[in-house]
Amino acid sequence: MRRGQISAGEYKEAQRIFDDLSKSANFAACRRKPGDASGMGSLGEIIMRLELSGELKENGFVFPEDDVDKIINDFRQTLRSVGIDGQL
């Protein structure tokens, strides 16, 4: 609205829609009851749940080797060849 891309009426309508959706979804913490689900939560909470459930123990997807992987493997081979593998 500040940049003149929408009118005041369009802004008010968008604000009204946002407020209605926020009320129906109980976004405000003061409106939620104890035990109500509040969505996914924080990233830390998501990571904790995944770690506790063991879901992160295995990656079932193997990425195909790309040019960067080939270059890294070439450098590792070079380091092994000159006897300094693991020292860098």
Image: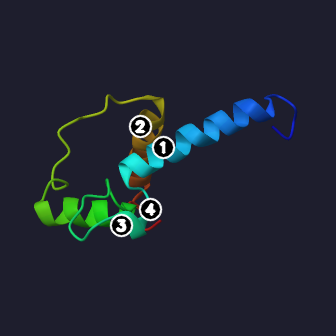
User: Is label 2 in contact with label 4 (beta carbons under 8 Å)?
Assistant: no
Instruction: Tell me what residue is drawn at x 31 percent, y 33 percent.
Output: 63
Residue 7 can be seen in this image: yes
| Number of the front mark, 4 or 3 | 4
User: Is label 3 in contact with label 1 (beta carbons under 8 Å)?
Assistant: no
Three-letter amino acid code of the residue under disc 3: Gly
Q: Residue beneath label 3, please?
A: 44
First along the sequence among labels 3 and 1: 1
Residue 86 can be seen in this image: no
Instruction: Tell me what residue is drawn at x 38 percent, y 45 percent.
Output: 77
Instruction: Tell me what residue is drawn at x 79 percent, y 29 percent.
Output: 6
Q: Nearer the viewer, residue 68 or 25?
A: 25
Q: Nearer the viewer, residue 59 or 65?
A: 59
Q: CA distance from mark 4 to mark 1?
A: 12 Å
Instruction: Tell me what residue is drawn at x 34 percent, y 60 percent.
Output: 41
Please, what secondary structure does the residue beneath circle 2 have?
helix
| Number of the front mark, 2 or 3 | 3
